[in-house]
Image (tube, grey):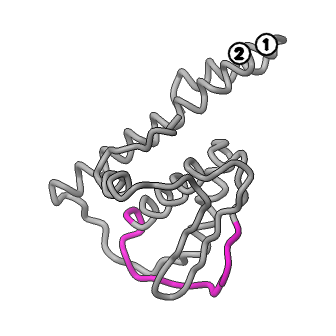
Amino acid sequence: MSISNVHLQNILQVSQSEQVKDFVSKALIGIERLIHMVQQLLILSWLDAGQEQEAPKVIHIDSMLEEIIDELKSQRVMSHNNILVNNRMHSKWVGRETQIRILLRNLLDNACRYAEDHTQISVQISDTEIVIRNVCAYMSTAMLQQSLERFKRGSSSQ
């Protein structure tokens, strides 16, 4: 946790003003996102440099998914969405835990961020795949292609 987080949380606890509490809450969310992005960029640079040394191991996908959903709830990313996880089969995959965690977190984060308000996000798990669906605005072929590029965000990004 950063020093900024500590100071902002202190302000949040002692402030009587709802407007100040609202601004501080938004600042805390921004700091959490920034910390997460920096962590991802560091991991990405390690992967690009071939320095990632994590060995593949057995990963309980459903448990990891629950942790990520709880994390997103605590960061208020999914404030207006509901995630429904189907086909809980206690699936186990073999892979690099950090990479799979980043992949799932990014997919769920994007599904929440770009979903229409008050819609459900569906997650289906099997031993071979995870399918994440949301209801979102229409994307042209060009926009869909652009969304697959690194560091691109849609126009509705916060």
How far across and how far down the image is residue 63, in percent?
A: 61, 72
Given the image, on which type of amino acid does mark 2 rest?
Answer: Ile
Numbered mark located on residue 11 in the image: 2
Q: Is residue 102 above or below residue 20?
A: below
Q: Is residue 98 above or below residue 35?
A: below
Numbered mark located on residue 135 in the image: none
How far across and how far down the image is residue 50, in percent?
A: 16, 60
Q: Please name whichever residue, 48 or 133, is drawn nearer the observer in this view of the structure.
A: 133
Residue 15, quarter of picture: top right
Magenta segment, which residues?
Answer: 84-99
- Taking the magenta stretch, the answer to whether it contains residue 56 is no
Given the image, on which type of amino acid does mark 1 rest?
Answer: Ser
- Taking the magenta stretch, the answer to whether it contains residue 94 is yes
Q: Is residue 93 above or below residue 76?
A: below
Name the residue rendered at 23%, 57% in the picture: 47
Neighbour tally class for label 1: few under 14, some 14-19, many 20 plus, Cα within 10 Å: few
Name the residue rendered at 72%, 21% in the picture: 22
How far across and how far down the image is residue 80, in percent?
A: 72, 47
How far across and how far down the image is residue 76, in percent?
A: 67, 42
Q: Please name whichever residue, 37 or 149, is drawn nearer the observer in this view of the structure.
A: 149
Name the residue rendered at 70%, 19% in the picture: 10
Disc 2 vs disc 1: Cβ atoms closer than 8 Å? yes
Q: Is residue 151 above or below residue 85?
A: above
Name the residue rendered at 50%, 38% in the picture: 157
User: How much space separates mark 2 and mark 1, taking CA atoms?
Assistant: 6 Å
Q: Please name whichever residue, 84 or 88, is drawn nearer the observer in this view of the structure.
A: 84
| 117 sits left or right of 37 in the view | right
Neighbour tally class for label 2: few under 14, some 14-19, many 20 plus, Cα within 10 Å: some
Q: Indicate the secondary structure of the residue bearing disc 1.
A: loop
Q: Indicate the secondary structure of the residue bearing disc 2.
A: helix
Residue lying furthest right in this view? 16
Q: Which residue is mark 1?
A: 15
